[in-house]
Every structure is written in structure tokens, then in C-alpha cells.
Amino acid sequence: MEVAKIVGVGLIALVIVIILRQNKPEFVIYAELMAGIIILTMSFDKIAIIIDLIQSFSSKLAISNRFVMILLKITGIAILTEFAVSICKDAGESSIASKIEIGSKVMIVTTSIPIVSSLLEVVLKVLP
């Protein structure tokens, strides 16, 4: 029923945005921002469950905790980026949204370098 709560908040926010757009369009972005923050906050409990599950799998499978943390960081970057890009696009600032996307892609590639280098080391050991 968590989804019903999230959908409910989204639909209430939609009604508020429609009303504000007719009467006070300058406040629309604030309503959209608050709705996004509320929905993101509602998702944090589920994100914590996923993190715990991934950490338990990594300990059972003898995967380096360092790699798991890198994957979680990359996932966090992607989620926050999508949130910020959506807000920028809602505000009509697609050029800023595209800059955020480019910056986050650079951050994801930079963050993933230890995983890529470890993978290359394994490949080089296997090759004759």
C-alpha cells in the first residue's frame, strides 16, 4: 500500500499545481518541489531495506564491500540526478537539466573507475 500513498501524494500535488497554475503560476515550482521531496522521503524506508539486502548478499558472496558501496553511490547519484533534472524540466529550464545530466554522468564514470580497473586486472590475468 506504499504505492497508493505515493500515488495519492502525486495526485494531490497535481490538483494543487493545476489550481496554482491558474491563480498563482509563480508558486507552481514550489508545489512541484515539495511533492517531489515528500515522495522521495517516503521512498527512503524502502531504499534502506534494499541497501541492507545488498550488503547481506555481498557478505554471503564474498564480494568486496568497497564495490558494493561504489554501486550504491552510483545508484544514489542516478536517483538524485533524475530528481533534479525533473525539477529543472518542470521549471522550463531544460538547458540546466542537460548540464546536470552531463555532470552526473561524469561523476558516475569517475566513481566507477575502481570497478572498471579491477575488472581489467582480472581480464589481464586471464589472458595469456
Image (cartoon, rainbow, N blue to C red):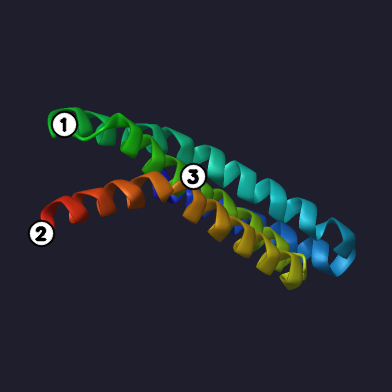
Q: Residues within 10 Å of mark 2 (few under 14, many from 20)?
A: few
- The residue carrying mark 1 is 62
- The residue carrying mark 2 is 128
Q: Amino acid at mark 1?
A: Ala
Decide which of tag 2 and tag 3 comes sooner along the chain: 3
Q: Can you tell which of label 1 and label 2 is closer to the viewer?
A: 2
Q: Amino acid at mark 2?
A: Pro
Residue 105 on image: x %, y %: 54, 60
Q: Are marks 2 and 3 in contact (CB under 8 Å)?
A: no
Which secondary structure, mark 3?
Answer: helix
**Residue nearer the viewer, 54 or 41:** 54
Q: Is residue 22 left or right of residue 45?
A: right
Which secondary structure, mark 1?
Answer: loop
**Residue nearer the viewer, 11 or 46:** 46
Q: Can you tell which of label 2 and label 3 is closer to the viewer?
A: 2
Q: Quadrant of the N terminus?
A: top left
Q: Gap between marks 2 and 3, in whole Å?
A: 38 Å
Residue 114 on image: x %, y %: 38, 44
**Residue nearer the viewer, 104 or 127:** 127
